[in-house]
Image: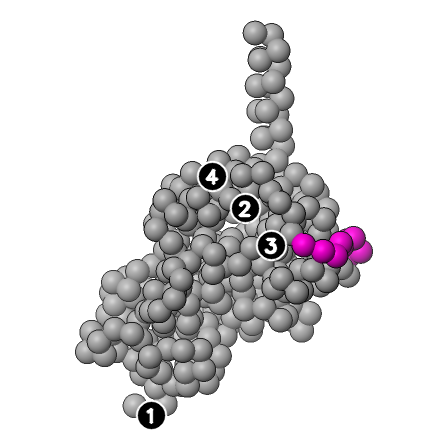
Amino acid sequence: MKTLLISLILLMTFSSQAFASIGTDTWFISPRQAKTHLPRSTVLDVRSASAFGMGHIPGSVRVSWQQFSKPSGPEHGELLEPEALQEAIRKVGVSNQIPVVVIGDANEGWGEEGRIVWMLRALGHKHVAMVDGGIKALKRAKFGTRMGTSATPQPGNFTIEIDPSLVASHDDVKKAMKAARTILVDTREGREFSGKTPYGEKRGGHVPGAKHLYFKELMDKNGMILPREEIEKKLDALGITTTTPVIAYCTGGIRSAWLVAVLQHYKFKASNYPGSMWHWASMPAEEFPLQSAQN
């Protein structure tokens, strides 16, 4: 009995220390902060297998947004059904009681680290953050890396508890088209916003009334997230304040998820439309309209 009591106390102490390392309002951490967080967290790396193999943080597990999403077609950006999704998340070692740190390549990537952070937060994990600047920032901070394949994690016990405030549906987007209070933000490249379809959308253009803000405009040349005051200036130009509901979208909810993560960190009210243009553009034009430079 005494041994069991001591074990429970140690577990509670460990859990409280771990959670203290990543606050519920912290969606990204600096490389300096990562020195404290990485040893006590589950570490996920979203880069390609080749990039991961050339150098990764020891003990990290390579993941991709695709393994948690529907396989193909118009719903490719949507998350898996809950039972399959929960199992996929447990398989990479995620548990509710252990913080998660996500590493990407801010310069070369598509915001995949933000997608994983947004996904886990939307599914109820409250202690998840991405590393500002990604793997390159960690290397500049003299973190050691290891070549080779991904670690084999112990399965986690993650349980889904959806936070609906972080997820937008196509019905929410339709309502936002008619309600000036909610602002739609298109996080794709300018050519996509204007009507080009380089990434497989059925139709080109943007949701009527949407504002354009390419997600990498919130980074500097090194892939580091801009200071709060600079981001607030960009958002203010779009009519967005911390009290403005924002729905972000892109092609498949990846780049938009990264932007949502940054906005949430800075206390903005943002949600992600995971289906995004792959879904919206596949639906009937009469009910799911798009505007482009041509119309």
Of labels 1 and 2, earlier in sequence is 2
The 10 Å Cα crowd at callout 3, few under 14, some 14 to 19, many 20 or more, is: many
Is residue 149 toward the left or the right of residue 286 in the image?
Answer: right
The answer for how far apart the CA atoms under marks 3 and 2 are is 8 Å
Span of residues in magenta: 141-149
The answer for how far apart the CA atoms under marks 4 and 3 are is 18 Å
Is residue 78 toward the left or the right of residue 37 in the image?
Answer: left
The residue wearing badge 4 is 158
Of labels 2 and 4, earlier in sequence is 2
Of labels 1 and 3, earlier in sequence is 3
Q: Residue at coordinates 58% horizontally, 58% vertically from top-left?
A: 46
Q: Residue 4 lies in what quarter of the image?
A: top right
Q: Which of 213 and 230 is in front in this view?
A: 213
Is residue 196 toward the left or the right of residue 131 in the image?
Answer: left
**In the displayed structure, would residue 3 be above or below residue 264?**
above
The 10 Å Cα crowd at callout 4, few under 14, some 14 to 19, many 20 or more, is: many
Closest to the camera, between mark 1 and mark 3, is 3
